[in-house]
Amino acid sequence: MNISKILLVSLAVLVLLFGCTSKQTGSVEEKTDTADEKTEPPESKAQENPNKNIENAVIGTPYKIKYLNTEYEVVLKEAKFASSNNEYFYKHYVVAFFEIKNIGEDTDFFSPDIYSEDEEREKISRTFAVGLEDDYSKTLSFIEQLNVGQKTSGWVAFEVPESLEKLDVFFEYSNPFINRQPQYIKYEITK
């Protein structure tokens, strides 16, 4: 009985170590749309070395990332500071609207870790925004199977102090079981 458990666990570890790493690239590049195919896209750190993190991502700019077996396009469409006006829940948030599209050749599950850090580098986990308008009710699903060409989108909220002036939002897309170093797109949100 114990030998079968040991064999099963050993097999699972081998599959994770060797089976999952064959297509893992974890790279990122900025996607630029050009009207003229002869025009070269502007140089960016992401295009120069696609295995580096993007530190100063631009809101509204699509970024192409490779996650496990396929490619995705990630766009932070909008981000802003918001406050609830509910008499029971008076809280302050930073809300960010992400859109993710499978632009690869495979259907796959996508589960990014989206979190933020304040000015003192303290990590702030995402939360549900209580008391905001219905405009912010569509939240981003964090574990979703996306078919080729399929999009998902929604809001991510972070509860913050009212006095906060700047927040860094991280869209981390690396697989922690395969990569020890996180790979992310970092956005700076200011009031």
Image (spheres, rainbow, N blue to C red):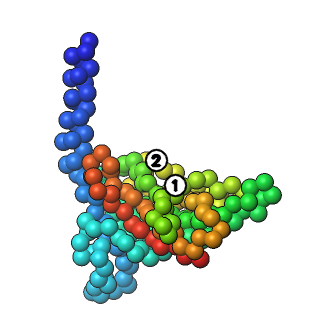
Q: Can residue 37 be seen in this view?
A: no
Residue 62 drawn above or below residue 35: above
Q: Mark 2 points at which residue?
A: 143
Q: Which residue lies furthest to the front in this view?
A: 120
First in sequence: mark 1 vs mark 2: 1
Tell whether 101 sits left or right of 86: left
What's the distance in space between the residues labelled 1 and 2, CA to CA?
A: 16 Å
Q: In which quarter of the image is residue 81?
A: bottom right
Q: Left of 169 or right of it: where is 130?
A: right
- Asked whether 67 or 81 is in front, the reply is 81
Regarding residue 168, the answer to whether it shows in the image is yes
Seen from the viewer's position, the closer of residues 125 and 33 is 125
Using the image, determine if residue 34 lies above or below residue 126.
below
| Amino acid marked by disc 1 | Ser
Which numbered circle lies on residue 125?
A: 1
Q: Position of residue 174 (x, y in %)?
A: 33, 55
